[in-house]
Image (cartoon, helix red, strand yellow):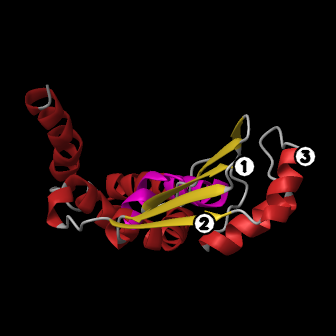
Amino acid sequence: MPLRFGTLRQWHWISSAICLAGMLLFAITGLTLNHASWSEAPPRTESRQAQLPDSLQQALLASPPSGTALPAVLRQWLEDTTGQALGQSPAEWSGAELYLSLPRPGGDAWLSLDVRSGRLEYENTDLGWLAYLNDLHKGRHTGVIWQRFIDLVAIACLVFCLTGLLLLLRQTRYRPATGPLLGLGLVVPLLLALLFIH
């Protein structure tokens, strides 16, 4: 059964409402990704060193951790010392040395702990708000929830574009310029890709 005109318009406006904020974000960050030189802010890096408390050091030496999970007491001390939420970051143990990589949108952080000496090194790099938005655009280090949101926006955009196309096709008999403009919209990107991308 073919879609009725009213149903098509309803799908069109509902999908546009769902994807409006996402489309605006992705259009703006598409420009900023394409023109990275517009805002080349220098990264801000913070470094810290700390010493593992003796009691915690002795406990870790007596019962060395293994696997990718951190002991709860060590996790708490690391978070308190660095001010960084560790989330579910997997621990990398090499003997008595711990390394944690803590990437996030718009920045990066890492920490290294030598349990034998008790020395902690921590570094946090902030690349700025533009890098944050660009990473949201790419879904880089954003987690599952944001990635599902991007999927939802992409589906809503597809519905928006396809219902818009069907609505345009229905207007070709009333507005003769619709067909040629629609053809240009489809052919020009193809020609640009064939002629200028090598």
**Residue at the spot of label 3:** 62
Q: Give the percent coordinates (x, y) of residue 153.
A: 52, 59
**Horizontal side, residue 33 vs residue 99: left or right:** left
> Mark 3: which amino acid?
Ala
> Mark 1: which amino acid?
Val
Give how far apart the Cα atoms at labels 1 and 2 are: 12 Å
**Horizontal side, residue 112 vs residue 158: left or right:** right
Q: Secondary structure at mark 3?
A: helix
Local packing at callout 1 (Cα closer than 10 Å; few below 14, some 14-19, many 20+) is many
Local packing at callout 2 (Cα closer than 10 Å; few below 14, some 14-19, many 20+) is some
In the rendered image, the vertical position of residue 190 relative to residue 76, given as above or below:
above
User: Upstream in the sequence, badge 1 or badge 3?
Assistant: 3
**Residue at the spot of label 2:** 50
Quarter placement of the C terminus: top left
Q: State the residue at coordinates (21%, 57%).
A: 36
Q: Nearer the viewer, residue 6 or 61?
A: 61
Give how far apart the Cα atoms at labels 3 and 2 are: 21 Å
**Horizontal side, residue 157 vs residue 36: left or right:** right
Give how far apart the Cα atoms at labels 1 and 3 are: 11 Å
Q: Give the percent coordinates (x, y) of residue 151.
A: 57, 52
Q: State the residue at coordinates (65%, 60%).
A: 145
Q: Which residues are magenta?
A: 132-155
In the rendered image, the vertical position of residue 124 relative to residue 95, given as above or below:
below
Please say whether residue 179 is one of the residues in the magenta stretch: no
Q: State the residue at coordinates (17%, 52%).
A: 181
In the rendered image, the vertical position of residue 128 relative to residue 192, given as above or below:
below
Q: Nearer the viewer, residue 125 or 28?
A: 125
Local packing at callout 3 (Cα closer than 10 Å; few below 14, some 14-19, many 20+) is few
**Horizontal side, residue 52 vs residue 134: left or right:** right
Residue 141, visible in the rendered structure: yes
User: Upstream in the sequence, badge 1 or badge 2?
Assistant: 2
**Residue at the spot of label 1:** 115
